[in-house]
């Protein structure tokens, strides 16, 4: 599948991906899942997990948790 975005929406997606600490592709997937589920709680948890894994990747790698 190809997703075509105008410049404005591409910038919005880039900000969302950065906020969640994931790729644009992953941000789109998470946003679709959140919209389908009707709740943002799971998305908030997944986003927090993604940020923590990104932020503490070196420590988690040393611990063997990732």
Image: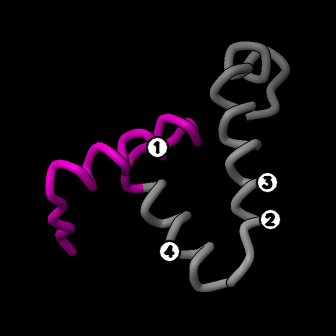
SS class, disc 2: helix
Residue of label 3: 45
Q: Which residue is mark 1?
A: 17
**What distance separates the C-alpha of mark 1 from that of mark 4?**
13 Å
Magenta-highlighted residues: 1-25
Marks 3 and 1: CB-CB under 8 Å?
no
The mark nearer the N terminus, 1 or 4, is 1
User: Helix, strand or loop at disc 1?
Assistant: helix
Q: Which mark is residue 41?
A: 2
**Distance CA(mark 2)–CA(mark 4):** 14 Å
Residue where numbered disc 4 is placed: 32
Residue at left offset 79%, top offset 54%? 45
Q: Residue at x 46, y 55 (%)?
A: 26
Count residues near mark 4 (Cα–Cα under 10 Å), then give few for <14, some for 14-19, many for 20+. Answer: few
Where's residue 8, x and y in %? Answer: 23, 50
Q: Which one is in front, 11 or 28?
A: 11
Residue 15 is a magenta residue: yes
Give the CA separation, mark 1 to mark 2: 17 Å
Query: In this picture, is 55 found above or below 41?
Result: above
Is 35 drawn above or below residue 44 in the view shown? Answer: below
**Residue drawn at (62%, 73%) of the image:** 34
Look at the numbered discs 2 and 3 and tell me whether their residues touch, using CB distance below 8 Å: yes
């Amino acid at each position: 599948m190809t997703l075509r975005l105008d410049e404005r929406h591409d910038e919005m997606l880039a900000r969302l991906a950065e906020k969640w600490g994931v790729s644009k592709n992953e941000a789109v997937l998470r946003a679709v899942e959140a919209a389908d589920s009707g709740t943002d709680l799971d998305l908030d948890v997944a986003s927090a997990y993604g940020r923590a894994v990104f932020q503490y990747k070196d420590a988690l790698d040393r611990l063997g948790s990732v």
